[in-house]
Amino acid sequence: MSDTIRKVEFLLGKETIKIETGALAKQANGAVLVTAGETVVLVTAVASAKPKENADFFPLTVDYKERTYAAGRIPGGFFKREGKSRDKEILTSRLIDRSIRPLFPEGFTHEVQISAMVLSSDSVNNPDILCMIGASAALRVSDLPFNGPISAVRIGRVEGQLVVNPSLPDEETSDLDLIVAGSRDALLMVEGGANEIPEAELVAALTLAQKENARVCDQLDQLAQGLKTGHMKWAPLAVADELKKSAEEMSRAGFKEAVRINEKSARDVKVSEIKDKVQTALKEKHPESKSAINQVLEGVMYEEARKLILDERKRTDGRGFTDIRPLASRTSVLPRTHGSALFTRGQTQALVTVTLGTPSDMQIMDELQGEWKERFLLHYNFPGFSTGEPKPDRGPGRREIGHGALAKRSLYPMLPTADDFPYTIRVVSDILESNGSSSMASVCGGTLALYDAGVPMKKPVAGIAMGLVKEGEKYAVLTDIQGLEDHLGDMDFKVSGTPEGVTGIQMDIKIAGISVQILTEALEQARQARLKLLEHMMGTLPAPKTELSVYAPRMIMVQIPIDKIGALIGPGGKNIRRIIEETGAEVEVEDDGSVYISSLDSLAVERAKEQVSGLTVEAEVGKIYKGKVTRIMGIGVFVEILPGKEGLIRMNQLSDHFVEKAEDVCKEGEEMEVKVLEVDQQGRINLSRKAVTHPGSENVGRDAVGGPRGGSRSGGRDSRPPRRGNF
């Protein structure tokens, strides 16, 4: 890497982006420091000196890390240092990987690592876009064989207007979050979510993003100008002409037949037989050429599969380009879950379940900007048996995290608000079979499972995966791609949404880019397929169930004034513990005054609600309450008119006639109706029984300021000041 320090500055949206190279991390092949506002990221690119042995893929690794010191925070939890990557870090790493991977040359098998570190965060500028641009810049100033540059931009929509590079506060009010990576001339990667954005507006956002990306690519070329002193020496795996010819002749006819086999397992068996046969036949003459032979065989199969589509206009399973595989779905497939669905499309099958929990089940998200709670969780699992392979379960990998995030993003806009449905919602998608687009099967199955659980979704959501095969000007857009079409095709484009618009989108390609025109065609084809999927799903379960499962907790949310939280909790938690013990319901209080009451017994919920209301509601002057006598004292009788809230009936308000001893007219535990006469400035409640039994008589014996009158019983005004009780 050159010691020359170079800088460029340019405007992206409203923020100035600064990129510097040559000052830091100079032993890396390429390194840049990217700054926007007070957010600073360091991105480096490093490659191994030698190719990876027997690699049949490009060994690229991307690691995005958020240092908590960047936001002036110390990591939470027991271990006070950064550890395992969090979901946000994994998802950002995937964004970078998917953007740059297509632009490395075929056959390049040197290990490459991109490291992106957030060094400073101002909670205004999102570091993910800076790291994506930084990865391209680091590769551009390095000696690696990268066919860039590329750029990335986020497009939002605030109050109906498209916004380039919205700030983090702006993202909170945006109904579109679209990340687009591209070269000067073509789109490379798309990732985003929206609140039912129409396809035409999505195309407008993509067009705007591509225009911005082209402008940034010019700046990256300017940064690298004159810095490169040489290029990394590398060579693709050499294949002898004789070996290549022999392998092609022995395999082509078999592969031509194999790509026409509909059933995945049968096709895989056929392909394995062809490969084993060729390897065995050529092993003696070419003993060290196993990798080279595999490369030739993959190339032959690639050619035959694409010829079938582009030349014969046929697909492996005989479908038309816009046809969806056979669909099957049902709900309530598991007896004890709160909601469940089994969704099958061709040889892709997802078992999706829903579990409803209380606010205590929300996930605490420890992010760079601080902690917050997430009420909607979606977890995607991809076991080995789903593809007929033995694979140990070591927890979710990057693929599982990414697919789960896409499905979550797709369903999220259609969930009810916490005010309407205060439950924590967990969706789990277990993939039982996989032959293309299991993430979109998770979206379809997720809608059905949420409906089955009684979650009042605004609208149903379905998703479909689109593919592309392109050679020169000739291309075919494929609806509902299966595994082979994904593996040998040029694009994996997933689109999910409602009948009205798109809620989730993700595109990855393997070529140097595609035009907005092709993507527009794919979006329309996806919309038509989505409508067919929704029609099928609504035939299975047309609306959310009106009743929750008997095994789901019953829960309500009561909003109380913030200044009443202390009264509800009580000294040392006394009041809230009593409510829980007496009713059997769980009561959880949030800092904003939201009180969540839950139990499997709906009657327990109602009882707890009454007590919460009683502790937090204000007594209304003039209102009659039915209360219970709790204490009898010399000054009068204390009556509990609301749970935990007492008032005082003074002696002259017990009856319309003189009462010498309160015990003469009432006893502890007795219920009686009383009227609230006054709530003084200290919150003390004065009651009257006489006002209920003899309406209009409550003012007899009261002075002008509403206090009780001492002394004379005759009704004349006493000259002494009012007696003030202390209760």
Image: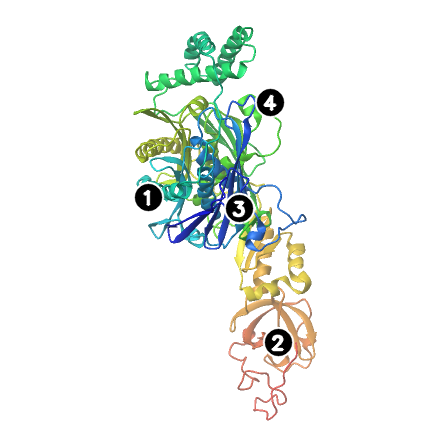
State left or right for residue 207 relative to residue 676: left
Residue 318 seen in the figure: yes
Front residue (pair 278, 457): 278
The numbered mark, 3 or 1, whose residue comes first in the sequence reads: 3
Q: How far from the left and from the top, in percent, is residue 325? A: 41, 24
Q: Residue at x 46, y 15 (%)?
A: 296
- Give the CA separation, mark 4 to mark 2: 78 Å
Element type at mark 3: loop
- Please report contact status of discs 3 and 1: CB closer than 8 Å, yes or no: no
The numbered mark, 1 or 2, whose residue comes first in the sequence reads: 1
The numbered mark, 3 or 2, whose residue comes first in the sequence reads: 3
Front residue (pair 398, 647): 398
Instruction: Kindly identify which residue carries mark 1.
Output: 208
Instruction: Kindly identify which residue carries mark 2.
Output: 649
- Please report contact status of discs 4 and 2: CB closer than 8 Å, yes or no: no
Dot 4 amino acid type: Pro
